[in-house]
Image: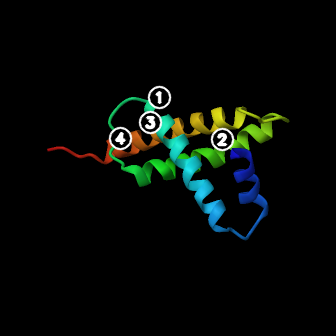
Amino acid sequence: MLHALSIVAATDSSVDVGSILGYLVVGLIVGVLARFLLPGDDPMGIIGTIIVGIIGAVIGGWAAGAIFKDTAGVDWIASIIAAIVLLLVWRAVAGRSDVRH
């Protein structure tokens, strides 16, 4: 399903309710797994987790498709890794903007 989401995003300009729900579910799963695997305090709620998961899924699905011919299972792993990298970037940026006197 994850690979199908990246294909739909790249080729289909019409998005239906099922596609939106698919993006939200995959984003939630990938985002939650990434936050679980990268312990620490992240100042984001469920919406931020879903957004990180969706972006990670799109980037990871694209990267898996670019590297491997058969992406069954690899796209999920790549998506979680991409979401973890996004969380690390988020922490670095959020940490810099936290000014304490």
Element type where label 2 sits in the image: helix
- Looking at the rendered structure, the secondary structure element under dot 4 is loop
Query: Residue 15, how many percent across, how many down?
Result: 68, 68
Reading the image, the residue beneath label 3 is 35
Cβ atoms under marks 4 and 1 closer than 8 Å: no
Q: Earlier in the sequence, mark 3 or mark 4?
A: 3
Task: Measure how far apart labels 3 and 4 are at the Cα level.
Answer: 8 Å
Between the C-alphas of marks 3 and 2, the distance is 16 Å
Q: What's the CA distance linking mark 3 and mark 1?
A: 6 Å
Placement of 91 over or under 18, stated as above or below: above
Q: Give the side of residue 72 with respect to residue 24, left or right.
A: right
Q: As rendered, which of 58 and 23 lies closer to the eye?
A: 23
Q: State the separation of the CA atoms marked 2 and 4.
A: 21 Å
Identify the residue at image location x=74%, y=50%. Answer: 4
Q: What residue type is labelled 2?
A: Gly
Q: Which of marks 4 and 1 is nearer the N terminus?
A: 1
Q: Residue furthest bottom?
A: 14
Residue identified by numbered label 4:
42
Q: Read off the residue under disc 1.
A: 37
- In percent of width and height, residue 8 lies at 74, 58
Q: How far apart are marks 1 and 2 (CA)?
A: 16 Å
**Label whose residue precedes the other's in the sequence (3 or 2):** 3
Image depth: mark 1 or mark 2 in front: 1
Give the mark nearest the N terminus, 2 or 4: 4
**Proximity of marks 3 and 1: CB atoms separated by less than 8 Å:** yes
Q: Mark 2 — residue? A: 60
How crowded pointer 3 is (Cα within 10 Å; few <14, some 14-19, many 20+) is rated as some
Question: Residue 94: x and y, percent?
Answer: 35, 45
Circle 4 crowding by C-alpha within 10 Å: few under 14, some 14–19, many from 20: some
